[in-house]
Image (spheres, rainbow, N blue to C red):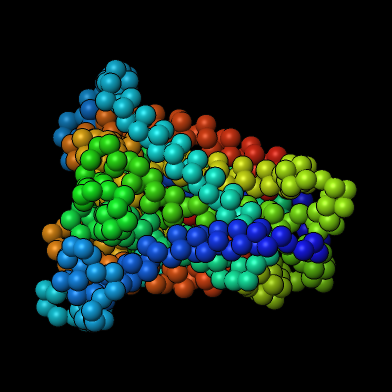
Amino acid sequence: MERRNPWVSFFVYACALLLALFLLAPILWMLIMSVSSTNDLTTIPLRWIPEQIDFHRYIELLTVAENSAGKAFLASMRNSLAVATMATLGALLVAIPGAWSVSRSPGRQRLALYAVVATYMLPPVALVVPIYFALSALGALNSVFSLAVVYLSILAPFTTWLLKSSFDNIPQEIELAAMIDGARLDQIWRRITLPLTGPALATGGLFAFLLAWDEFFYALLFTADQRAKTLTVAIADLAGGRVSDYGLIATAGVLAALPPVLIGFFLQKSLIAGLTTGGVKG
Amino acid sequence: MMNGNWMSLRSWLLLAPLLALMTFIIGWPLAKTVAVSFTDAKLLGGDVHWLGLANYQKVLAAPAFYEVVWTTIRFVLISVGAEFLLGLLAALLLDQKFHGRGIVRALMILPWALPTVVNATMWRLIYNPDFGAFNALFTQLGLIDAYRSWLGEPGSALYAICLADVWKNFPLVALIALAALQSVPRELRAAAVIDGAGPWSRFRAVILPYLIGPLTVAVVLRIIEAFKVFDIIWVMTRGGPANSTKTISILVYQQAFSFQQAGLGGSIALIMVLISALLITGYVTILRKQGELK
């Protein structure tokens, strides 16, 4: 290992500090806003460190009282959870057999997968008007279930692609050996394939969940009130509405960011595979 | 033993639910959007008349449309350009050995994991014209004389949004580039040092060949996403002020849902699909060349 010139070392540490600061500052400020008094947040010059730390907004948003901000917020959190869970399970249900099939057959099935991946990258504005017509005709607007079905258009292709590469990593010989021994496909899957891909399935599911948790465009158009509004729509309402307590908006942001950030840290190791598969929506 | 025909049939059967679902929630709406774009359909129903290419003619003849396209292109170029540059620099930095590298690497996950709407909301608070941290910081540092409305002025709004977008998305580019950097064999780097290659020629001859593929994937992926941008702009400015941040997705939303012109909105959406399709074809071609999709 070559010894580093002290000036180079200094430069590396200075850059690292700058990078860390750039990454942390906005989030740190959102956290500080969420526990500062409204007075501290609306003085000039701005008070960067709050006089006293105040968690009342967290309590306000996490308790249900009639017509309170908490009631709407918790409802939207429950809706987001329901939509993301249903959409993730649905996506896995079609993605597991689909991905296995593409992984094990070299033929036209792969072309079908390209087609699926390509269509899922299309802008949602290209699909939204007919989906709106259809949901409206069926009386299915403003429903958590319909939204989950619409989300499958994003989650199912993504999950299939991600799982395909995991199935590729299992040696086909193991499955073939079991097949020669007379095992049926469902037995092979239950005993060999799925246990071997267990961690990858969990990772795929978590990525899918994140995609659904983040989704905003369809939710904005297809939901109207507390029965189906998701967290992203609720936060956009807060940000664009008449709320004058900036700290409350920041608190809602922190609470909405908490689950994906935790999942993000948990996924750190498998992040690259997910990222190149398009596991991020701008 | 099972024969080949049965195997092939079985693999299509296993793929069938996915293909059926995709036909149902992507294929059918897309076909329907094509049909609607040739009509004067309104969002809330009523008589529908066939217009032929009239919607397309109307859109392509309107100078306002080209302004929106130009705004979208500027957003893509500025955001993705900065994300590429910053992402590459951050990756080169994190490829160095230093204490606390693991922590900085983990911090890169934060912006990525933050939901786009939360990111937009956070920056909206930071840019607040009356009490925002951005104004406070730059005033206290003496860089500006008076508080400004960063998102409220047509001259600065798009750049302010770009900064928020870059903050969220450069870690994606950086993490992909970092993974590529760390796949460069140690022996290769050591050999280059022994051979007396300078930093620049080491970068060009040893590291760049490993970096260029993944980096291209990351940038093209970002271009495809940035071209569709809606969420961050909708939350921060809704396309304003004075249409200075109105991108194609926002325009479609407004035509189809605010003004109820489903037909006209559909035709703009399809023009957008054509451009996206070109980008996506490029992306899939690159992936196939690199063997990601065999």
Quadrant placement of the N terminus of chain A: bottom right
Q: Residue at x 46, y 31 (%)?
A: B275
Q: Nearer the viewer, residue B205 or B256?
A: B205
| Residue B214 visible in rendering | yes
Q: Residue B268 sits in which quadrant?
A: top left
Residue A67: x percent and y percent?
11, 73
**In this picture, residue A19 sits left or right of residue A179:** left
Q: Which residue is located at x 52 percent, y 56 percent?
A: B171
Q: Is residue B211 left or right of residue B116?
A: right
Which residue occupies 21% across, 51% down?
B147
**Is residue B68 positioned above or below A245 on the image?**
above
Query: In the displayed structure, does residue A255 sit left or right of residue A19?
Result: left
> Is residue A227 among what the camera can see?
no
What residue sits 34% from the left and 46% below the top?
A: B161
Residue A139 location, x and y as percent? Answer: 23, 54
- Report which quarter residue A43 is drawn in: bottom left
Q: Is residue A187 above or below residue A282?
A: below
| Label tally | 0
In percent of width and height, residue A123 lies at 41, 41
